[in-house]
Structure formats: structure tokens, C-alpha cells
Image: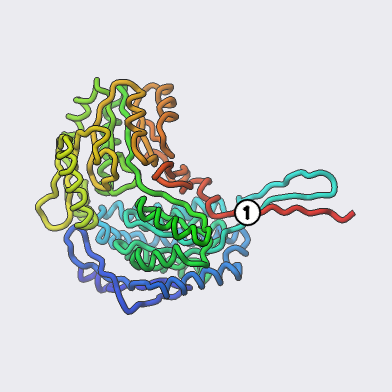
Amino acid sequence: MNLLQQDLPHSNNFINGKWVDSQECINIENPATGELIGTIARATPAHVDQAVSAARECHNQRRIAGMAPYERMQLLHAIAGEIRALATRGGMLLCLENGKPLSAAQWEFEEAARYFEYYAGMADKIEGRSIPLGDGLVDFTEYEPFGVSAQVIPWNFPVSLVARSLAPALAAGNSVVIKSPELTPLAVALLGEAMVKANVPNGAVNILCGYGHDTGAALVAHSDIDQIVFTGSVATGQAIMQAAVEHVVPCVMELGGKSAGVVFADADLDQVINSADVGNLFNAGQVCSAMSRLIVHESVYEQVKQRLVARFSAKQVGAGLDEADVTPILTKTQLDKITAMCARSQEQGAHCVLGGTPLDKAGYFMPPTIIEADVQADIAQQEVFGPVLVLMKFNTPKEAYDMANGTEFGLVAGVFTKDLSLALQASRQLVAGQVFVNEWFAGGISTPFGGVGKSGFGREKGQEALYNYVRTKNIAIRLTP
């Protein structure tokens, strides 16, 4: 711990290619112990003005937009290399501030680098089209960058999700202001080093850390931004959209989820249990696309429940540095919320099969929890953001679809069956932006991701995401005879 504090006792904001301190700082703690691990400068609305101004100047001078596409491609590859070089040091920081396993934290830097490599390959493929209008006229479209993209990043996968939005934004020629999460900002701050070493033009990437109610609010309401990208809760997303309305700023919203897996009678139960394991317990369930509900055919319900109890009971709950299977909840506030939701579910008639109460130890630990509940129970409707799996049973496919679609969310869903026709039918019946068949979290950087309903709109990842960051301009020319 002392070594870490000597290496990075305090981190600053990154504005216009320079490190900028503040009169106030934010303390960052380790959720596995509750101990302080570092501080970061608290950005103010004045810092927001500076960052947006720097981004605007960068865009007006076309430091990114004016590059030849192959030059942007080379720049993104350079950024990828510098991020990958940070994996050891940055992974340790992320493990300590976020609580996730060290291997997962280091992998997050690798994934971030791969985002930049993926969109580097697309930087020279943003192409318009020619539209025939007859003799004497030439008409064509161009894609141009929005300008200044404001990106508000959540705390659960901060490095990866910065890259997920930043890489396509830069590939398309935008400049960016990032508001990093105040709970896990230290690893994100390191990305400023990568930008400097990769020779990213000043003002193209700015990284601020502050609280949502002042720094975040000032950024999304700023009169000189051209686009907002947000990942987080429904309530915060609604507040951001209200701010965006004032200046008619387009948004990309990736919000909450209450995603369900549907297990048919013929499913491979090994695939079901493995998917429930990773889908519900990865990052202690602090994942918007977690498998938070499992809807099981009545003929295999008891077998699935017994196997889940056996698998979840065997999990080691502990610190990320120990590579525990289930790592801590990020804050005591969130742990208390999860605990209250589990207690409330039982008051409403749900049956807690496993877990349900925090571990009696230092840090913020919730063991794997399984709750049998009715589809209308609060815990079956509301996002928990913890290692809590709600079990339900069904008889007919229609009943399963109605249960799976019976929330306000529509981020992802899952289907488990050996029948390809049934899998396709179910995938089309489920209301979700992405459907996993026989493997939760199937897909990757190249597969589009986003929700419907209160899970948001717009798509991240894949080729579709690139077009979040450009707008179409039509040019019609009357030729001189």
C-alpha cells in the first residue's frame, strides 16, 4: 500500500494536454478494506469550461478532423500500444479502487487497447455515397464529426468503457471531454499518460474527475458540446437528457438492465450453470448486462436450482488481490441497498434460497444470493447491481416470454435450448438489444450493444457505434454548362 501511495499519491485532471490540479480532492478507498488508497483532484465547473474550450479549439483547428484517415488510424494504434503498456501498473490501481480481481483489472487495459485497434481499422472506412439526380447535377453525402463529444463514464468498468466511447469518437474525428467516475478514477487518469506518449493533439482528449451533481451536471449542460454519451443509471440518464434538451444535443444512452435467461426443457444444463455463474457473479454482479433473472422450465427447475446452489455455495468471497471468485461491492451504500432489497423481497413473499445478507468482515462483501420470487416482486423488477439471482419457473414458451419481457428494461436476454428453431423464435420474441443463445456474454468488441425501453438507445461497440459519432451532410451541385 505504501508503495502504491509513493507511486501515485495524487492524480490530477488532464486538460489540453496538461495536468491540472485543484484546491479540493476526492478520496478513493479500497472496497475490500475500506482503506484510503489515493486521492484525485476534484474538477469544478471552471475546469469543465477549460476542458470544453480546449476541445472546441482542437475541433475548430481540425487537429483530429483534418487528419487523413490513415493518420487517425496510426494515432489510434499508438494509443492502443501505450494503454497496453499501462496494464501492470494500471491494473493494480483498478484492482484496489474497484475491488475486482487483479487479472480482470489487467485484462480491462487489454480490452481497452483492443477497442482502439478495432476502430483504428475503421478510421479510413467512413464513406458517403453518390445519389443520382440526372444530367447537370452531382449529389453526394459526407459523414462529418459532431465536434465536441461529452462522455460520462460509470465506475464498474471505467477503463474499458472510456475506450469503448473514446476510440470511435477519435476515429470519426471528434474531440472529447471525459467525466471519469469519482468512485474509481485513478486508473482512468493514467490514460492521460497514454495520450501524451501517443502524441495525441492537445485538446483532443480531456479527462476530468468530479461529482455528478456539479462537474457532471456542468458538462452535460454546457452550451458548447455537440453530443453526450452516457452509461449508468436510468435516473441519471433521465437527468442528462433533460439537460441535453436545452441545447438540443443528441445523446447515446446505455442505461440499466434486468436481464433474463430463459431455460427450456431440452437445455444443456452445464451451459446454463456456467452462464449463470459468469452472468451473475462476474464483477460481483455489478454489470448492467448481468443475468439477474433465470426463468426455468418447470420440468428442470428443481435440478437447475440444486446445481446453482451447489455452484454458488462453493464460491470464494474476498478481495480482488486474492483473485476471489466474488469480489466486494464498491460502496457500503450500495451494499446496504442490496441488503434492503433482499429483505424487502422476503417481506413480499419471496424465498431466499442462498445468501441474502452481507458477510461479517471488513470491506463490503455480499455472498452469492439466490431468491425465488414472483415476476411482480420488486426484486424481479428492479436492478440490484449485485450478486443476486432471481429464479422463476414457467410452463409454456409464451409464459416465459411474458415473464422475460415483463420489466421496463430491455438490455440483453438469454436463451438456452438445443433446438435451433426454438432459439431463433425465442430470440425474436424477447425484447432486448442483444440476445445470447447458450452462452451469456457471448460476443465481443465487434458486436453491437445497447438497449430498448428504459435500458436506453443508441448502440455501442461494433461498426454501428462508429455512426454515433458522425452526422450526414448532403452536398448537391448544379454543374455549369
Q: Position of residue 137 (x, y in %)?
A: 81, 49
Q: Which quadrant is the N terminus positioned in?
A: bottom left
Please give the count of numbered marks on the rendered protein: 1
- The answer to whether residue 163 is seen in the rendering is no
Q: Position of residue 404 (x, y in %)?
A: 34, 32
Question: Quick check: 136 left or right of 404?
Answer: right
Question: Quick check: 79 left or right of 21?
Answer: right
Q: Position of residue 141 (x, y in %)?
A: 68, 51
At x 25% / y 30%, what residue is drawn? 392
Say which quarter of the image contains residue 312.
top left
Question: Quick check: 97 left or right of 180?
Answer: left
**Crowd rating for badge 1 (residues with CA inside 10 Å; few <14, some 14–19, many 20+):** some
Q: Position of residue 332 (x, y in %)?
A: 19, 57
Name the residue nearer the viewer: 424 or 212.
212
Q: Quick one: SS at disc 1?
A: strand
Question: Dot 1 corresponds to which residue?
Answer: 143
In the depicted structure, whether residue 435 falls above or below residue 446: above
At x 13% / y 46%, what residue is drawn? 357
- The answer to whether residue 46 is seen in the rendering is yes
Q: Amino acid at mark 1?
A: Tyr
Q: Which quadrant is the C terminus positioned in?
A: bottom right
At x 52% / y 67%, what residue is drawn? 224
At x 25% / y 40%, what residue is drawn? 378
Q: Which residue, as the protein is rendered here, is positioned at the far bottom?
A: 23
Say which quarter of the image contains residue 320.
bottom left
Name the residue nearer the viewer: 196 or 225.
225
In the depicted structure, whether residue 436 falls above or below residue 448: above
